[in-house]
Amino acid sequence: MRILIAHPGLRAGGSEARAMVLIEALQKHHDVTLLTGAPFDCGRLNAAYHTFVDDSRLSVRLAPMPERLRFSRGGDALRGAFLDRAAQKLAGSFDLCIGAYNFTSFGRPGIQFVADFSFDDQVRHAFDGVSHGLRGALQREGPARALYLSLCGRISGVAGLPRPAPGDVVVANSRWTADLLKVRHGIVSRVVYPPVHAAPVEPGERSGDFVMLGRIAPDKRVLEAIDILSKVRARGHRFDFHIVGDAPNDAYGRIVQAKAGEHADWVRLTGGLWGAEKFAFLGRHSFALHVRRREAFGIAVAEMVKMGLAPFVPSQSAPAEIVGDERLTFADEDHAVEQIDALLRQPADVAAVKAGLAERGRVFSTEAFRAAALAIIEETLPSRRTLEAAR
């Protein structure tokens, strides 16, 4: 079969892992083409996601667009519009089309993997707020936003932000995402958790320190995390807080660096860690804090669960679904302080929580994702030939 997989740009994140695992599984027995908006670095992505994609057996097509847009940190909708236009031109030559990041407008039914709600302005604003500068002006409701979306529609040939087409099979990355898709858009979806790789957990002593893993950006609420743990420490607990992620040289990054400096005796800016180095670091610590208010999944949370940490997460978000334990969830910052304080005072409860998390971690695996995704693909392919060998 000829299969087209579309992704706007494989950089770093959960949707990239999904795309790489799909390509690896399918290219063994099918002719796979990747349509993307940015250069494809197969070696880097294989190393990052522990896949074995053979780039000599993969056809890569770059969607035509201005070169500056390919590498821009903004312009996501515009980049998606160029991807949609290219997808519609190519789709007729394939037996199956797969959107690996939200909704790609193929002009024909396909499989659409939903990663987040960037296509829903109201939800996106509630999750992440609005950026500053020109990017923020294009995100806010108003004439500039309307003009921007009109331009995107003229490029893609699809009015407004992408939505599923009739006949699309929609796959959500969590039950939380599936519920919101149904409530907000009337979209019925199937749930397949993203592939999450982690190294084997090595036995040994762990510190009682906390870790935050991921981008250093306003939506991750790093400053609020420092405030929460500062209040926990004020109750007599002693631990360090390791913020794992590159601090960008922007306004927010500088504020985070300054605040970390104010608490230099216990707040550590570790910088970005990747691959084996990241997993080795996680395996040395016991707790984590994730403060983003709402999130469609949370790859970093699942990685930490699989590496034996106990992450405290917001209750109204998919990360609460990942941890599956009310003792690790909180409604707001004050509640977070109470929850963390309560668990740290009960070593027996910590052991029970971690035992439960060890079971939860098995749900979020590359093998589980591959089996579930291939089952959906097998149902959807026009031919019922088995994909057993691909499994």
Image (cartoon, rainbow, N blue to C red):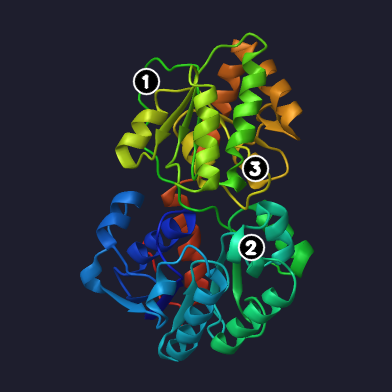
- Please give left or right for residue 197 compared with residue 176 in the image: left
Q: Amino acid at mark 2?
A: Gly
What residue is at 37 percent from the left and 70 percent from the top? 38
Look at the image and tell me whether residue 38 can be seen: yes
Residue type, label 3: Glu
Which comes before the other along the chain, label 2 or label 1?
2
Q: Position of residue 257 (x, y in %)?
A: 49, 34
Quarter of the rendering containing residue 341: top right
Q: Which mark is residue 320?
A: none
N-term mark: 3 or 2:
2
Give the SS element for disc 2. helix
91, above or below 289, in the image = below
Query: How dense is the environment of label 2, judged by Cα within 10 Å: few (below 14), some, or many (20 and up)?
Result: some
Name of the residue lying farthest toward the top: 236
The residue carrying mark 3 is 321
Residue holding disc 2 = 136
Residue ID at (48%, 70%): 377
Q: Gap in Å between the C-alphas at discs 2 and 1?
A: 47 Å
Which one is earlier in the sequence, the residue at label 3 or at label 1?
A: 1
**Residue type indicated by callout 1:** Pro
- 135 or 271, which is in the foreground? 135
On residue 203, which mark appears? 1
Q: Residue at x 44, y 40 (%)?
A: 245
**Considering only vertical position in the picture, is 278 above or below 237?**
below
